Image (cartoon, rainbow, N blue to C red):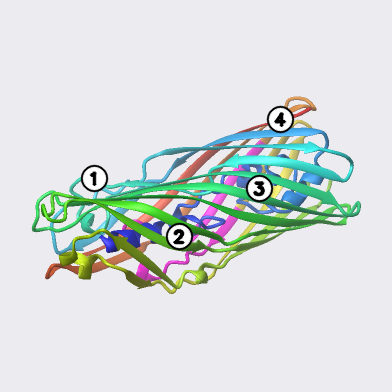
Amino acid sequence: MNTRLKYLALMIATLSSSAWSGGFALNEQSVKSMGTAQAGRASSAVDATTTYTNPAGMTSLTGNNISGNLTYIYAPADINNAQGSHAGSNDGDMIPPQWVGSGFMTHQVNDDLTIGIGNYAPFGLSTNYEGNFQGRYFGDKSKVKVIAIQPAIAYKLSPELSIGAGVSISQLEGILSASIHPLVANSHLEVTGDDISYGYNFGVLWQVQPSTRIGFDYHSKTDYTLDGTSEIRNLNPLVNGNYAASLDISTPASFELSLSHQLNDDVTLHTSAVLTQWSVLENLNIKNTGIPAAFVSNFGAINEVLEWKDTWMYSVGADWKYRNDLTLRAGLGIDQTPVSDAHRSVRVPSEDRTVLSLGASYVFNDKLSFDTAYMYLKEKTAHVDAHKTVSGTLIQYSADYGGMAHLVSMQMNMKF
């Protein structure tokens, strides 16, 4: 049971990436930024989504602004060269298609002060292997959903320099299941957990010259205390039932530096670099309570060493004003994974990624505009090599995962 809780913690930690690290972070808060592979995300400040990407950018917006978007995520996967101690299938395509949405609103109080609020899903994961998956003893179903609300405020210190800050209130819900023992038919464990926590972000926007902006955004480390229930089914009448479990975990801080430069009247270039401090995840300490005394030695506290590493994401992109009412975009990004070969699991078979994107904006009038973007993510082949011993029985599974993702997004923007 503590092993499955370990994977729940690992999965949740991976989800907290500010870009795409680990494979399952959601970063579709701004469709315009998606069109440039997130390049210029902290420096462009062109619609209400800047409430999340850099709250200082809200001072660049006049009047009242509303942005709402929706993204469709399709992430097929191939499993090759699978081997294991127990038989099973390896169909892949374990990530069901998902819809993700968010909404933002800003209000200009006066020439210097702007406030805003956002509602979005910063992290999310849903993996569901087939029932006879060969690696089912290391995980067969995972689902994590995080919903956040973020009020923010921005102030213009001078015509060239603005600062901003936001506070995020987020609710995390997680479900995790796996088969337990190959010698006990249909033995299964499902872990659920949830928590509400708080974080913040801080941003600076500097208009270096009329054609050049620099943006900086910091997202804080967030501390969660997950209170959960572990349900054991069909293992042994002495242990079948529900047990309490708890886990303290911190998700890493991130720093983003972006630059946007207007090359001429029609073309604007963007670039970004993001550092995520994954090294905060050195180990996981999970505690289980209420388990019968005979099984405490197997299902008590656990301290698991992770030794994750800090990662970088880099991206470049451009906007091209094709005509007054139509702007086209493109971008390229490279993103590192924090997961080492030793800690890669069937739940998080993550590797480094290359990101390509295209986007467009259409302006209907001075009050209404529409954005769309397509993003393609290609992951390096990820090798999973898992093994453990359960009640004297050795369980092994290894495979090569080939992953990719297609994201299609739409966004409406209103000014009034």
Q: CA distance from mark 2 to mark 1?
A: 24 Å
Q: Specify whether 176 is left or right of 189.
A: right
| Label whose residue precedes the other's in the sequence (2 or 3) | 2
Q: Identify the residue shown where x is 35% and y is 71%.
A: 304
In the rendered view, tell whether residue 283 sits above or below residue 291: below
Crowd class of label 2 (few under 14; some 14 to 19; many from 20; radius 10 Å): some
Crowd class of label 4 (few under 14; some 14 to 19; many from 20; radius 10 Å): some
Circle 3/circle 4 CB separation < 8 Å: no
Closer-to-camera residue (155/130): 155
Q: Which residue is mark 1?
A: 130
> In front: mark 4 or mark 2?
2
> In front: mark 3 or mark 4?
3
Q: Identify the residue shown where x is 74% and y is 38%.
A: 106
Q: CA distance from mark 1 to mark 3?
A: 37 Å
In the rendered view, tell whether residue 113 sits above or below residue 353: above
Q: Identify the residue shown where x is 34% and y is 64%.
A: 287
Q: Which residue is mark 4?
A: 369
* Residue 349 coordinates in the image, percent (x, y): 36, 59
Q: Which residue is mark 3?
A: 52
| Label whose residue precedes the other's in the sequence (4 or 2) | 2
| Label whose residue precedes the other's in the sequence (2 or 1) | 2
Q: Quadrant of the C terminus?
A: top right
Q: Specify whether 223 is left or right of 413.
A: left
Secondary structure of residue under mark 3: helix
Q: Kindly identify the amino acid type of the residue bearing the numbered disc 4.
A: Ser
Circle 2/circle 3 CB separation < 8 Å: no
* Residue 22 coordinates in the image, percent (x, y): 45, 59
Q: Which residue is mark 2?
A: 13
The answer to whether one can see residue 178 in this image is yes
Q: What range of the chain is rendered magenta?
A: 332-360
> In front: mark 2 or mark 1?
2
